[in-house]
Image (spheres, grey):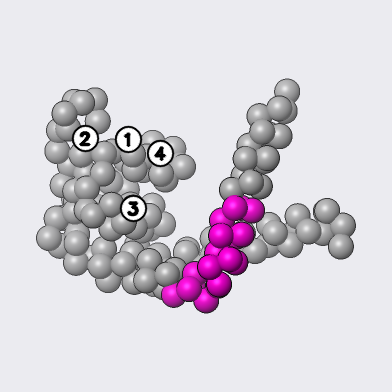
Amino acid sequence: MSNTDKLAEFNARWMEQNEIYRKAAKRFRLSESAFWILYFLQESGGTLGQREICAAMCLPKQTTNSALKKLENDGFIIMTESSSRRCKDVSLTEAGHRCADITAGRVIAAEHLAMSGLTDEEQEQFIELFSKYNKLLNKRIGDIK
């Protein structure tokens, strides 16, 4: 198999994984942005800085902030002034914790089960190789003039 074929196969698997998460968000009747915000808040224990969420989302700030505003209007999060004053803290409300538990929490549990289907060695190799690929790709794209 050529590098071109391998890259096409990798990209197909990457898009397949993205579709898995897209379908999960849709199943829960959430936008992808709202799903990922709930996901990151669930993983963090319920509170993150707005800047941290924007960085984790890898999406334009406007997209993330629109999703945050909708979650706030729906009563799932509360945004409060942080100590830095330049960025707000985002916290799950009681309703937000319940929503995150039955949406992102279930996906996180499924991820743990899927990862446990790999041996410890396979898990380490998977993470190591994916990290190495991302570093190489970032460098090569950074070299583009």
- Examine the rendered structure and indicate whether residue 143 appears above or below residue 2: above
Q: Amino acid at mark 4?
A: Ala
Horizontal arrangement in the rendering, residue 52 relative to residue 142 (left or right): left
- The residue that label 4 is drawn on is 55
Nearest to the observer: residue 46 or residue 72: 46
Horizontal arrangement in the rendering, residue 85 relative to residue 4 (left or right): left
The N terminus lies in quadrant: bottom right
Q: Tag 2: Cα neighbours inside 10 Å, few (<14), some, or many (≥20)?
A: some
Identity of the residue drawn at 27% across and 71% down: 102
Q: Which residues are magenta?
A: 113-130
- The residue that label 3 is drawn on is 40
- Asked if the residue under mark 2 is in contact with the one under mark 1, i.e. CB atoms within 8 Å, the reply is no
- The residue that label 1 is drawn on is 51
Q: Amino acid at mark 3?
A: Phe
Q: Amino acid at mark 1?
A: Arg
Mark 1, secondary structure of its residue: helix
| Residue 125 is inside the magenta segment | yes
- Asked if the residue under mark 3 is in contact with the one under mark 1, i.e. CB atoms within 8 Å, the reply is no
The answer for how far apart the CA atoms under marks 2 and 4 are is 14 Å
Identity of the residue drawn at 68% across and 62% down: 12
The answer for how far apart the CA atoms under marks 1 and 3 are is 12 Å
